[in-house]
Image (tube, grey):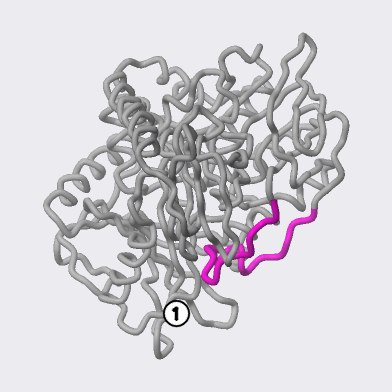
Amino acid sequence: MPSPPLPADPPRSLWQRTSVAIPSDPLPERADVVVVGGGLTGLATALMLARRRRGVVVLEARTVGAVTTGNTTGKLSLLQGSVVSGIRSHAGEEVARAYLAGNRAGQEWVRDLIGDDAAVIQNRTAVTYATTPEGDDALQREAEAMTAAGAPVEVEGSRADLDLPFAVTSAIRLADQSQLHALRLLGRLAGELRRLGGRIVEGARVTGVDVAENGVQVRSSAGDVTGRLVVLATGTPILDRGLFFAKLVPSRSLAAAYRLPDGRRPPQGMYLSVDPEARSLRSAPTGSGAELLIAGGGGFVTGRSESVRAVRADLDAWVASHFPGAVRETWWAAQDYRMVTHVPFAGPLPRGGGRIYAATGYNKWGMTNAAAAATAITGQITGEEPDWSERLRASHVSLSSAGEAVGANAEVAGHLVGGWARAGFSGAPDAPPAEGEGRVVRSGVSPVAESTVAGVTCRLSAVCTHLGGIVSWNDAELTWDCPLHGSRFTADGRVLEGPAVHDLGRAE
């Protein structure tokens, strides 16, 4: 089946638009360590291991930075909305302190790698703010949690002197944080990794791992690679060992770059609200002396939004109300995963014989957490695991989040049953879907996903290849998204991300 052309307004991050391509290497037959995933976690882990004289190959299903790292807002910050207070309430103060120590180690590693290259990194003050009573309460809890964890913040009231075009009810600040150009960071990592003999192979989607007594065999669409160990740096682990898909909540959030009128500068801090409707703001230099405004928000559980196009329109309207005359230059979306424990995971997978490692659950803060996870896994492999990593791993045996896990999986079960029920009662209309539209209909007893993109109508099985959920149409990104565990597919059925590793089949 031919791939449909790109839509007129395809999502593509500012970082992807303003970076050079990273070259791909031939697939080797073997390596000491096989790293799966060409984002920040994968390349940082590979580089750390290469610096310790390990032979490393990175297998990337698409292109380097194609998924979460390439679609981030690029904040390298220890002030992370309400994350630390969430960890403190679920896992306790000691775990919150360990989390912050790991993120500080990750932040320092990235900064040391980049140095003072202003094209890649800029120093900024991070600000978390509120405009509602609910936000004020969340902000106070975060300030208390940060202070208890060893990172005291400045707390300010409604008269906070902020570089924002609207009033706030309270705010907290943390100076000396950073913002990044994510793809240029990956380019730096890739260059250093290759200098040390590591390889990066694009277009190699891993479909399975076989564990043997002396190593692993990694199966991919480009061929097999034999190694001693494998590290899954794929957002959510693509192997079902450990049932991580049942312990993670996937979500997508949108971001866009806007040019402001009359040479107006965007806010110079890194801002994030903790209101029920969260908003993110930062600036981005263009290289010509001008700066763009990066705005984000509108998070939703993957596959469960009635209209992602409406979410994007809402973000545009919010920006227009506070930055009149702003013109959107590009937009994008990123997928993130939160552990039900609220604590990221980095370590060996169960039933992997000590040869399969994974990292996941960054809860939208991948710039610091990715480098922290790479540090943790490298330490576990080399026998130099940091104390904070041991404490974070131990926290995952806690029962404090059992209720949330049950609730999350009850929602998954509801969408599984509901998706099949809706597909069972919707017959196929005679006319194909309109341009840019998709729908799930019944063909005999089978649910069929129909869509039309750039004049090409595709009919696919609507059953996700991971665990049988019924996919739903994403009307902004023009993709099929599974509401169960976040797997995503192109309009013609090719797998994009998530625990699924196989394409949607063609409809009979």
Viewer can see residue 111: no
Question: Residue furthest toward the left?
Answer: 133
User: Could you tell me which residue is drawn at 34 percent across and 67 percent down?
Assistant: 313
Horizontally, residue 397 falls left or right of residue 289, namely: left
For image coordinates 49% across by 75% down, the residue present is 329
* Magenta span main SS: loop
Q: How many marks?
A: 1
Residue 292 location, x and y as percent?
Answer: 47, 75
In front: 71, or 239?
A: 239
Q: Is residue 13 magenta?
A: yes
Q: Residue 384 vs residue 402: left or right?
A: right
Residue drawn at x 61%, y 68% is: 17
Secondary element type, mark 1: strand
**Where does the image place residue 336, in percent across and percent down from the top left?**
46, 43
Q: Which residue is most to the bottom?
A: 262
Q: Which residues are magenta?
A: 1-23
User: Can the viewer see residue 323 in this picture?
Assistant: yes
Badge 1: few (under 14), some or many (20 or more) residues near its Cα, within 10 Å?
many
Q: Is residue 450 left or right of residue 151?
A: right
Question: 189 or 336, which is in the foreground?
Answer: 336
Q: Residue at x 75, y 33 (%)?
A: 220
Q: Which residue is mark 1?
A: 259
Q: Specify whether residue 352 is painted magenta.
A: no
Q: Position of residue 204 (x, y in %)?
A: 74, 41
| Of 279 and 474, the residue lying toward us | 474
Amino acid marked by disc 1: Arg
Residue 41, horizontal then vertical, whole percent: 60, 40
Residue 505 drawn above or below residue 243: below
Quadrant of the frame with the C terminus:
top right
Q: Quadrant of residue 175?
A: bottom left
Does residue 94 sit above or below 337 in this rendering? above
